[in-house]
Amino acid sequence: MKIKLLVRSSSFKEILDDRLKEFGLNSELVDQNQPLSGQLADADVLVGGTGKIDKSVIDLCPNLQLIHVSGIGYDNVDVDYCTSKSIFVANVPLANAVSVAEHTMFLMMYLAKNIQNTSNSLMKRRLPGEMGIELHGKTLLVVGLGATGTEVAKRAKAFGMHVIAVTKEQLGYKPGREKSFFVDDICGPESLSENVSRADFVSLHVPLTKETTGMIGTKELSMMKKSAFLVNVARAAVVDRDALFDALYNHRIAGAAFDVFWEEPADPADRLLQLSNFVLTPHIAGWTKESVDGAARIIAANIRRLSDGNAPLTLVNTQLLQ
């Protein structure tokens, strides 16, 4: 079985191969700076990162049986086309939830303590003039209470924050009815606009779909407090790009911190990156030894199932089982 990796890191290959060798398998890292056609022609399995795996890539792989993304999101894969070709698509739904949640708290603290501007003052041998704020006592709006959003809520409560969640019915909760020890209020998606006006921090943890694309736009940003911060570790396109720039440039919100961008890697000349109240990390929230090892375990197990003639356990296009 030929397993090809459309990822940027050889470290990922080493970790995955440690799992695959238990089954007598190994992977090959694709050189994405070279033509893909010859490299992918014999692929049975593609393991992808954040790059697009669309029809043009899929058609290079006549033997393809499985596309496995290395994280939760699979919006970069043409799932419908895969389904039409009877190609399994699988994801890793839980492995990086803790890592991404920890990174979310890091971004919140980075914004709260005004690190970006105070660091600039330090380099200019100036004492900082602006004070930071505490997370304690502040209101956090978690948009999307899935695995990652739940881990964020747990940590936010430990900081003494008031936590509101806007989410679809997940994890057995019924919005507005049941509550947990780490969420003070759980509401349905229809209450998003109302709740962004209550929050000191808004943290996004939803998948990128037709419904969530641009869900944070001019209306929502205009309803946020002028002192509020926006954190996005989901997908950049959940936020309207122009609306965000306008809100930050005109100081309608205090700041934003993203671990994702509309084009990756981001162009250093992008106008958002010139703003002192915008922080970007290069899609590393889930890039930890623990989360990558967890993802490798799931990917290897699913590849083993495929080699035994079974469907992956974390199948996305479940229509193929019908």
Image (tube, rainbow, N blue to C red):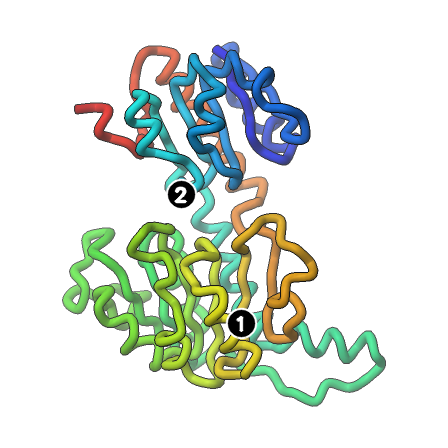
Q: In which quadrant of the rendered image does the C terminus lie?
A: top left
Residue 204 lies, in percent from the top left, at: 41, 62
Q: Which mark is residue 245?
A: 1
Q: Residue furthest right?
A: 125
Badge 2 amino acid: Asp
Binning the other alpha carbons within 10 Å of mark 2 as few (below 14), some (14 to 19) or many (20 upward) gives: some
Residue at the image position 42 percent from the left and 17 percent from the top: 64
Residue at the image position 30 percent from the left and 16 percent from the top: 310
* Callout 1 secondary element: helix
Which of the two marks, 2 or 1, is nearer to us in this view?
A: 1
Q: Say whether disc 2 or disc 1 marks the residue closer to the N-terminus.
A: 2
Q: Which mark is residue 75?
A: 2
Residue 257 lies, in percent from the top left, at: 55, 66
- Vertical order, 5 against 212 (above or below): above
* Callout 2 secondary element: loop
Q: Residue furthest bottom?
A: 129
Q: CA distance from mark 2 to mark 1?
A: 24 Å
